[in-house]
Image (tube, helix red, strand yellow):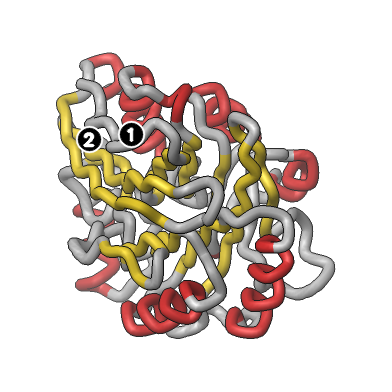
Amino acid sequence: MKSEKFISNNNLKIIFFGDLVGRPGRFAVRDFLQSYEKESCFVIANVENASHGFGLTEKNYNDISDYGVDCMTSGNHIWDKKEIFNYIDGAEKLIRPFNYPEGTQGQGSKIFEFNGIKIGVINILGRVFMSPVESQWTFAAKEIKRLKEITPIVIVDFHAEATAEKICFAKFCSELGVSAFFGTHTHVQTADEQIINNMAYITDAGFCGCADSVIGMDYNTSLNRFTTVIPERYDVANGDTVQINAIEVEIDPISGKAVSIKRIFKSEDKTKEEENER
């Protein structure tokens, strides 16, 4: 089923997928894009959990690229598959969080070009209830201003835990002229999509993966960790139904201002072949 069309054909269309969790999340996005008018839309996906729930292998990076994803953002788990250090510098579509220390491999922001339009994308980590990184407030302000000198369109993926930090940082970014701000990391799609100071905003985009799960992970292993407090390896959930959490945004390419924002929440049954794969 094709996605609902935007009002204007002159504006830039963007679809942003919440965190892809394992093979169910990758395949759900693949299947969604097969019936989506992606040729007229710039596609972004958060992929830090795409390879069995933790990190991103080079093979999965290439697969997701082949599905039609134009830009891949990430988060604190991007380093969980150690092979990332072998290919991240050459992965043109992938960005890691910007506010890691100077000298960290990869890039925290990039300029993409889509149908003749330049799009700046920056990935940023929050600090509340997260591992310590550089302050996003000073780092992001300088980088957003730099990107705005190149293009009026700047997209932020803010990978953070605390809702208050997301809301406050979003308002801060809106004052800097950001076009769209997508919260990620908590895997639960919020119902607060809105336009703030001409910037499309949502606290969390949610996740793509197994619907019968604990934010994409297997219930039993999650239960054991919570009830025993004994470390146990999380396993990706694998059920009959997968979900897609995504956001559609429309942006004026001249001013960089957001015109509309809409949540996508879809679920569908998997094929038996995919159900048995991991």
Residue drawn 78% across and 40% down? 90
Circle 1 — which element? helix
Give the residue pinned by disc 1: 24
Q: Residues within 10 Å of mark 1 (few under 14, many from 20)?
A: many
Q: Is residue 172 above or below residue 115?
A: below
> In this orientation, which residue lies closer to the viewer: 206 or 144?
144
- Which residue is most to the right? 103
Residue 225, image quadrant: bottom left
Q: Are marks 1 and 2 in contact (CB under 8 Å)?
A: yes
Circle 2 — which element? strand
Q: Is residue 120 left or right of residue 213?
A: right
What's under tag 2, amino acid-wise? Val
> In this orientation, which residue lies closer to the viewer: 54 or 137?
137
Residue drawn 35% across and 37% down? 25
Kindly tell me whether residue 143 is visible in this rendering.
Answer: yes
Instruction: Pick the quarter of the image with the N terminus.
Output: top left
Q: Is residue 202 left or right of residue 4?
A: right
Instruction: Pick the quarter of the image with the C terminus.
Output: top left
Kindly tell me whether residue 184 is visible in this rendering.
Answer: no
- Of the numbered discs 1 and 2, the one sitting upstream in the chain is 1
What's under tag 1, amino acid-wise? Pro
Which label is found at residue 78? none
Residue drawn 48% across and 59% down? 179
Residue drawn 59% across and 79% down? 136
Q: Residues within 10 Å of mark 2 (few under 14, many from 20)?
A: many
Q: CA distance from mark 1 to mark 2?
A: 7 Å
Residue 134, image quadrant: bottom right
Q: Position of residue 244 (x, y in %)?
A: 27, 39
Give the residue pinned by disc 2: 242
